Image (tube, rainbow, N blue to C red):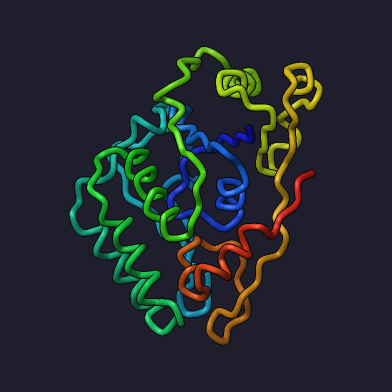
Amino acid sequence: MRLAIMQPYFLPYIGYLQLLNGVDKFVLYDDVNYINKGWINRNRVLVNGQEYLFTIPLKDASQNKLINEIYLSNDPKWRGKLLKTLEQAYKKAPFYFTAFAVTEKIINLDAEKLSDWIAAGFSILNDYLGIETEIVASSSIYQNTHLKAQERILDICRQEKADHYINPIGGVELYDKTAFEQNDIRLNFIKSKPVVYPQFKNEFVPWLSIVDGMMFNDVPKIKEFLNEYELV
């Protein structure tokens, strides 16, 4: 079984979804520390031909808390503001109506915790894109927060009886292939190939949120993008 483990990211870029689509089970790593100014509750979209960073507002967020201890802001206005930004940015995009409907449904999900909200959003997004990977939250199963770093990843692999672990390319220096081999687990890193598509008549801005990809491409084309990677 192929397994991947990643922190929950909100409407992530295509590389994250390549990893999600490329495994049999995907663990949302939600019982590790929240990262300020990371990609858990932030992302980039295209506004007036330039990348625009948006942030989902949170309540008392801190790097001293676990991701699954972080709550969304109680401010009722932020969802409408974000949707208005996306509407104005993409209303002339070729697949705006279908992509906006999916995005609106995700943003308006009723949840208090950030991790629950992101997980529910993946269910909607995966249905739209035809991704069938099983997703589980690390906090709900493994009971191994006493372990750290690679040892915890290996323990999750063993509990899941995974024989193939795939990690983002950024983790090459963090993991020891020998340790995985000793547990009869193949270790690979996913390396995305360039994914390029027309964004109105602008110079292409890469690696934006999947929202951007959905606005400019139909599902069959996005499915092609999901396979534009190699394992190293």
Q: Residue at x 63, y 65 (%)?
A: 224
Q: Residue at x 70, y 46 (%)?
A: 190
Q: Position of residue 192 (x, y in %)?
A: 70, 55
Number of callouts in the render? 0
Q: Nearer the viewer, residue 55 or 199?
A: 199
Locate the N terminus and report the quarter of the image it occupies. top right
Residue that sits furthest to the top in the current view: 146
Q: Residue at x 50, y 73 (%)?
A: 218
| Residue 106 appears left or right of 11 | left
Please tell me whether residue 97 is drawn above or below residue 184 in the rendered image.
below
Locate the C terminus and report the quarter of the image it occupies. top right
Q: Position of residue 76 (x, y in %)?
A: 18, 54
Q: Position of residue 201 (x, y in %)?
A: 57, 87
Residue that sits furthest to the bottom in the current view: 201
Please tell me whether residue 190 is drawn above or below residue 176 in the rendered image.
below
Q: Nearer the viewer, residue 95 or 69?
A: 95
Q: Residue at x 40, y 77 (%)?
A: 96
Q: Position of residue 68 (x, y in %)?
A: 37, 31
Please tell me whether residue 79 is drawn above or below residue 40 in the rendered image.
below
Please tell me whether residue 87 is drawn above or below residue 132 in the rendered image.
below
